[in-house]
Image (cartoon, rainbow, N blue to C red):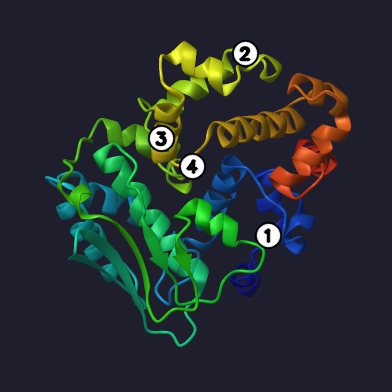
Amino acid sequence: MRLLEARSVPIEPLLERAGIPVKFLKEPLARVSPAQFSTLWTSITRALDDEFFGLDSHPMREGSYALMCHAALSSANLHQALKRILRFMRLVLDDLDPALEVREGQAYVHLSDTRPAPPLFAHATLFVLVFGLACWLIGRRIPITAGSFQSLAPRHAVVEYQRLFCEQLEFAQAQTWLSFPAAYLQQPVVQNTKTIREYFREAPANFLVKYRNPRGILAKIRRRLREQAPAEWPGFELLCAEMHYAQATLRRRLRQEGQTYQSLKDDLRRDMALDQLLHTRKSVPEIAALLGFAEPSAFYRAFRKWTGGLPSDYRTGAAHRAGA
């Protein structure tokens, strides 16, 4: 945001376009949906002509990410693709020097930073770009096993970083790196020039969240739940019976894709709530009932937990955009 101010780019229109209340800038617990953050991400990169948000002394001009995707597309496997991706990032950026290392069955993506106080968001953004593309290239989620950041732990946001990368994260360390099982390096690249068009249409939303395999168990359950109102969603035991899974097996499969059944339901309810608030005129009690809450007060508590804000905050943002 400071960079936008330095370049005299007003942030308010960008936030309103994304349906994000301006007041959230001063509320550290406020949260937004992936779709909202995706819209904001795109708006900022276009305003700055920098796909790395001014987080490096050399701008990553618009179109750089697409070129990197094409450079990696013809790779035989993930190992070759990551080598190309990291080499590309080294060519584009001046302050960050990413590298791949393999030892003792683990692959490490290291980041060297020439600055005395490396910004945490810069390192996290590079990891999001690299791993988001890497997961898509091989058509499956790469499980990050551990991570380390040179920067201090972010106030109010450690849980978000853990959800974004992995639970085993440490801050204020000597080096920045993320690790994953080295066996994934041999996974073949399964994408091609046809599928990359769809990838670009959905970017950046598709790499801002952990990779979602459209044929995976999470996608299957998500489609199943969307067929019914939340009040009619099955309990976990009934879901297992419907899908012909033992409960332990389904829990393990969900954990491998980074979620639990409860977190999946919470994410769907949150996205449905934001969609209703931003795009309909239903009252809050009506939305609460639609989402399966017995009382509006329960919906308010859940919404506060999901986003850090109130339903009225998002409805106000929608009203501003409608009148713009």
**SS for tag 4?**
helix
Query: Which is closer to the viewer, label 2 or label 1?
Result: 2
Can you give x and y, in whole percent of width and height, for residue 252 in the image? 41, 35
Query: What's under tag 4, amino acid-wise?
Result: Ala
Label 2 or label 3, whichever comes before in sequence order: 2
Label 1 or label 3, whichever comes before in sequence order: 1
**Furthest-left residue in view?**
76
Query: Which is closer to the viewer, label 2 or label 3?
Result: 3
Query: What's under tag 3, amino acid-wise?
Result: Arg
Along the line of sight, the residue nearer the viewer: 148 or 240: 240
User: Residue 112: which numbered mark, if any?
Assistant: none
Q: Quadrant of residue 129?
A: bottom left
Instruction: Quickly name the residue at label 3.
Output: 252
Query: What's under tag 1, amino acid-wise?
Result: Ile
Left or right: residue 86 versus residue 304 is left
Along the line of sight, the residue nearer the viewer: 314 or 211: 211
Please tell me whether residue 68 is drawn above or below residue 100 in the rendered image: above
Measure the alpha-carbon separation of dots 3 and 4.
Answer: 26 Å
Residue 52 appears in the rendering: no
Q: Do labels 2 and 3 touch, CB within 8 Å?
A: no
The N terminus sits in image quarter: bottom right
Neighbour tally class for label 3: few under 14, some 14-19, many 20 plus, Cα within 10 Å: some
Q: Do labels 3 and 4 touch, CB within 8 Å?
A: no
Label 3 or label 4, whichever comes before in sequence order: 4
Instruction: Quickly name the residue at label 4.
Output: 205
Q: Which residue is drawn at 40% across and 82% down?
A: 174
Label 4 or label 1, whichever comes before in sequence order: 1
Can you give x and y, in whole percent of width and height, for residue 251 in the image? 45, 32
Instruction: Quickly name the residue at label 2.
Output: 228
Measure the alpha-carbon separation of dots 4 and 1.
Answer: 20 Å
Label 2 or label 1, whichever comes before in sequence order: 1
